[in-house]
């Protein structure tokens, strides 16, 4: 179920970005998303939730929801990273833990932004995704 | 009479400058991270691999002889270029970082003891901080930083004070800062350190590609450089050390080449420079670094320095027109490095949007976190850095692209 | 149906094999010192330098991304090739010597104490002796050698005895000997060492170009290799370490890349593999080593092993016809290395006269002086060593040339 | 005087080798010279006089002669090296110290054997020549 949810959300993002041919237009959109992102609660933007990339910083909070689902909220000090973490939250948040842990995340690749997921980019995004998965996997294991 | 500019003369030597990224012509402004390679270097390395590669030294066959001569020729070129008093004062290393580690481990472990001080500056690259922290932690010694002023120059009063207060065993400083561009008054700093009885190490990583260097005139004990920033290949660099100090130093890495005789009853070491060069060297790297130095000299170090100085002034002026932009590092003497921040915007965002327009710049702390902390620049800076092939027009276009990025993010 | 031989298939990949020396066609039989490079490696390195060179990691621009992916791709290829359980178990180094020094310094200084033993064999290359002598001298530990038998195989009884007697902290041995060709029973040696509670390090310098390697099947803690002997470039090699042991090890070189955060109040280190990789890496080397491994796999490791085994048998038989000639190292399991001496004649003379006829061989102690002492070969040996491109006919011609040299000297 | 002596001896060697076009013929001649070389006195072939190259070993003895001249005798365990050290002795021995110390030794180059003088060749020859010069220079300095 949740696997389909994640897949369909990814497709939505891919369609949304399909409107933009040009590199700069794509980033313009990402920046708009970054500006809009419902940032993490101020109270949770703490070092506990900080993922320190070398280039930009990311905060991530995860909560267990009903029926083994996971809810994420996230933020970054760089707008483009913030747009990206926002997309990641949009795709994964509310899905069930197992589906998150195993999700095939291809949408960044499909919209031509996969380079931001490279661990060597050091923007914090790759570490964030890893942490989302680890949190979900731990939860799934606990419930299994 | 029309004069050809330096870039007009040299750009044809750099095939990479003709490429595109993201469908836009590449404008490469990340030279302080690594310079591009002239054809002579690329072809020289190719020629070696395709025509006379062999393991060097102790080889009695013809290819080994050719390779040895070419590799040792690279050493001679470095020695001549920085005016070392002999080739045995040049140790090939994997780069500046490796060279500083060699000194920190071979010299440092033999000479530092509990309570000693190693003095460095707050503008050092991590490569000239962490190796000292490691050996000092082991020996119970301390690493003390000298302050940097608002304009990005070294605080000479603090330097004098620190020399007097700490009587450091070793003083290390960059010849030119990779983040600020600042050229330090190395002869003066060295003379003061020597008067205080300290051994001196200069990190010339950012000087070799830009400035004429004379280690004897400077009077330093150690001077390090790295090939890939000086139009040369990756994986190669050098340590200059005064003969007497190198002779007194124990070796660091053990293995082939660095030995005279090996037995399980006891091993004796080779003479300079081989004592510090264990294992098969980076032969093609040594050869190609020699070619890179020939290339620099063919173009003329003075011409490069003058060109880059003019570019920095031009960039400072052109960037000054953008609102909210602040240049970090405004020393009068600078190599081709311009760091900047824009109020309220994150360097990573700016760098990403410049990349999208074809401009390669570097963002972040540039491996100088203590400097960034000191200047209160938590997210680092955006850095444009220049080389012999950089044009004024490229800088003008970068300023326009930066303005566009700023507008997108505001 | 005519089968094409391995050399027929691969020689066209090696431009250097068409050259002459002293007016004679080159016959390159010095592969154990360093192998020649296939065009794919030469061109891959050229392509990198001409098209996408940039400093890697932490770079937000496109070229930095391309370079990083290619360099990290090299790491993945090594990991897959030797069956490491993940890329973080592969540390890029400047070569085997550098890799062993890394272990001797980072692991050794943290784990060896007074009275401890490091066990190695008498057939080790200096690279697997001297680093241990250095750290053992510092720590008051000792390096103990295991005997080698007349035929050039390891004395397994002595090995067992030494394990029991000395309870070594670490056992180091070559996978294949560069002087004798002997392939050691590495799985068995590792299992025995593990049973005795020792950490194991295998020097795979001579195995990577010739044999299929599976570090998980062998079960060793450390395994090292060097690029230039495996059809790759100079200045690059690797250390494999099991994740847990690498994680527990302190870093060795300090500088950029290997840190998480640097400040004068305290510095924290990066995770694997970067913790052990300070400074700008040998980017083109890492990329080209990956290409070399692709090349080996394209040709087929098994095909290479089989070809070289046949060459060794052929060489042994052909050389056996020369009076007064003795082959040093007659193990049944050998890589493509044939060492020999001729009664009353000096290897240097023989090597020089072979060179004059176009044959590149190596003479001397091959950085295995303790082995030469042990075998009573004061002037070393003459060594012919083979690669995928070596032909039977080249060996036959070498035998004729050697006969001529012997006659000239008698 | 001695400078001319060294020069004319070098020319003799060069002429002698000019007879041989072929690499192998040249070496054949060198080997013959090596076999003939009046080796060092057995009593002086000791570790005191040993110069250990990595490839071959050389023994060198030097004595002060009349009027500040220097007399050398030498040997090697490799015949080719022995031929080369014999040539070196033939060119330099008996000349006066100052001339030896300052000699322009070009004959190995001229006969195409200069590669044996490369210090990286490790046959002991380069170290031997260095020691001949050092001995001569010390003697010349003492007499000056
Ligand atoms: C068995 C063995 N170990 C170690 C080495 C050292 O390798 P490198 O010189 O590339 O560091 C070599 C080659 O020289 C070797 O043959
Ligand atoms: C000032 C300075 N020092 C040291 C280094 C380290 O050089 P490498 O990474 O080539 O060892 C650099 C470049 O990264 C530098 O800019």
Image: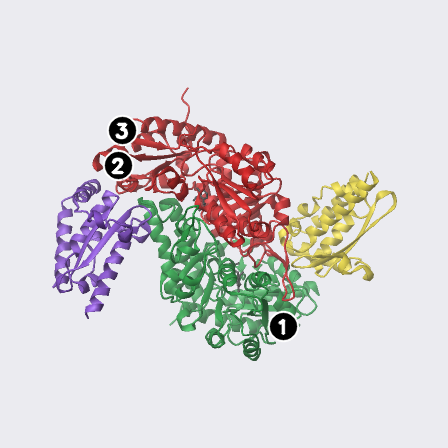
Chain colours: A yellow, B green, C red, D purple
Chain name for mark 1? B
Mark 3 and mark 1: Cα distance apart in space: 82 Å
* Left or right of C246 on screen, residue A77: right
The image shows residue B343, relative to residue A98, as above or below, that is below
Which residue is the site of mark 1?
A: B326
- Label 2 or label 1, whichever lies nearer to me, is 2
Q: Position of residue B205 (x, y in %)?
A: 49, 63
The 10 Å Cα crowd at callout 3, few under 14, some 14 to 19, many 20 or more, is: few
* Badge 3 vs badge 1, beta-carbon distance below 8 Å: no
The 10 Å Cα crowd at callout 2, few under 14, some 14 to 19, many 20 or more, is: few
Residue under the image location 58 percent in, 69 percent down: B115
Q: Which one is in front, B82 or C348?
A: C348
Q: Is residue C44 visible?
A: no
Residue B17: mark: none
Q: Residue furthest right?
A: A66
Which residue is the site of mark 2?
A: C344
The 10 Å Cα crowd at callout 1, few under 14, some 14 to 19, many 20 or more, is: some
Q: Position of residue B284 (x, y in %)?
A: 41, 50
* Left or right of B230 on screen, residue D37: left
The image shows residue C97, relative to residue A44, as above or below, that is above
Chain name for mark 3? C
The C terminus of chain C appears in which quarter of the rendering?
Answer: top left
Q: Position of residue C148 (x, y in %)?
A: 44, 35
Mark 3 and mark 2: Cα distance apart in space: 12 Å
The image shows residue A11, relative to residue B214, as above or below, that is above
The image shows residue C304, relative to residue D98, as above or below, that is above
When asked about the image quadrant of residue C383, the answer is: top left
């Amino acid at each position: 179920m949740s696997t389909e949810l994640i897949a369909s959300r990814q497709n939505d993002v891919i369609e949304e970005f399909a409107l933009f041919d040009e590199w700069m237009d794509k980033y313009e959109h990402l920046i708009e998303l970054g500006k809009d992102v419902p940032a993490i609660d101020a109270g949770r933007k703490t070092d506990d939730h900080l993922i320190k990339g070398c280039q930009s910083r990311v905060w991530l909070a995860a909560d267990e929801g009903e029926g083994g689902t996971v809810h994420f909220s996230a933020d970054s000090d760089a707008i483009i990273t913030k747009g990206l973490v926002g997309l990641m939250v949009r795709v994964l948040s509310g899905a069930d833990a197992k589906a998150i842990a195993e999700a095939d995340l291809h949408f960044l690749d499909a919209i031509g932004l996969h380079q931001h997921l490279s661990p060597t980019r050091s923007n914090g995004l790759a570490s964030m995704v890893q942490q989302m998965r680890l949190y979900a996997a731990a939860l799934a294991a606990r419930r299994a | 009479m029309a004069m050809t500019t330096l870039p007009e003369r040299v750009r044809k030597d750099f095939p990479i400058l003709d490429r595109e990224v993201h469908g836009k012509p590449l404008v490469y402004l990340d030279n302080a991270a690594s310079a591009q390679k002239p054809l002579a270097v690329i072809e020289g390395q190719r020629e070696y691999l395709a025509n006379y590669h062999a393991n060097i030294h102790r080889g009695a066959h013809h290819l080994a002889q050719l390779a040895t001569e070419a590799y040792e020729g690279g050493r001679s070129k470095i020695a001549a270029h920085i005016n070392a008093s002999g080739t045995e004062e040049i140790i090939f290393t994997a780069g500046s970082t490796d060279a500083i580690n060699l000194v920190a481990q071979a010299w440092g472990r033999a000479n530092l003891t509990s309570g000693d001080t190693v003095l460095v500056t707050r503008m050092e690259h991590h490569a000239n901080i962490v190796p000292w922290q490691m050996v000092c932690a082991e020996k119970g010694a301390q690493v003390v930083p000298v302050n940097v002023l608002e304009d990005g120059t070294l605080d000479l009063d603090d330097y004098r004070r620190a020399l007097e207060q700490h009587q450091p065993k070793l003083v290390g400083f960059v010849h030119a800062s990779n983040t600020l561009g600042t050229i330090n008054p190395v002869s003066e700093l060295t003379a003061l350190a020597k008067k205080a009885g300290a051994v001196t190490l200069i990190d010339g990583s950012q000087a070799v590609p830009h400035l004429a260097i004379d280690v004897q005139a400077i009077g330093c004990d150690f001077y390090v450089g790295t090939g890939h920033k000086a139009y040369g290949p990756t994986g190669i660099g050098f340590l200059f050390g005064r003969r007497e100090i190198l002779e007194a130093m124990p070796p660091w890495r053990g293995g082939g080449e660095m030995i005279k005789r090996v037995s399980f009853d006891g091993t004796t070491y080779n003479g300079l420079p081989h004592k510090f060069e264990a294992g098969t060297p980076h032969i093609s790297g040594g050869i190609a670094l020699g070619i890179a130095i020939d290339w620099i000299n063919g173009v003329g170090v003075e011409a490069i320095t003058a060109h880059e100085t003019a570019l920095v002034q031009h960039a400072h002026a052109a960037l000054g027109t953008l609102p909210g932009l602040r240049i970090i590092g405004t020393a009068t003497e600078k190599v081709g490095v311009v760091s900047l921040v824009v109020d309220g915007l994150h360097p990573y965002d700016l760098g990403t949007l410049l990349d999208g327009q074809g401009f390669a710049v570097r963002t972040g702390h540039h491996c100088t976190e203590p400097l960034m902390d000191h200047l209160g620049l938590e997210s680092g800076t955006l850095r444009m850095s220049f080389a012999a092939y950089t044009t004024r027009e490229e800088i003008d276009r970068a300023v326009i692209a930066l303005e566009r990025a700023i507008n997108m993010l505001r």
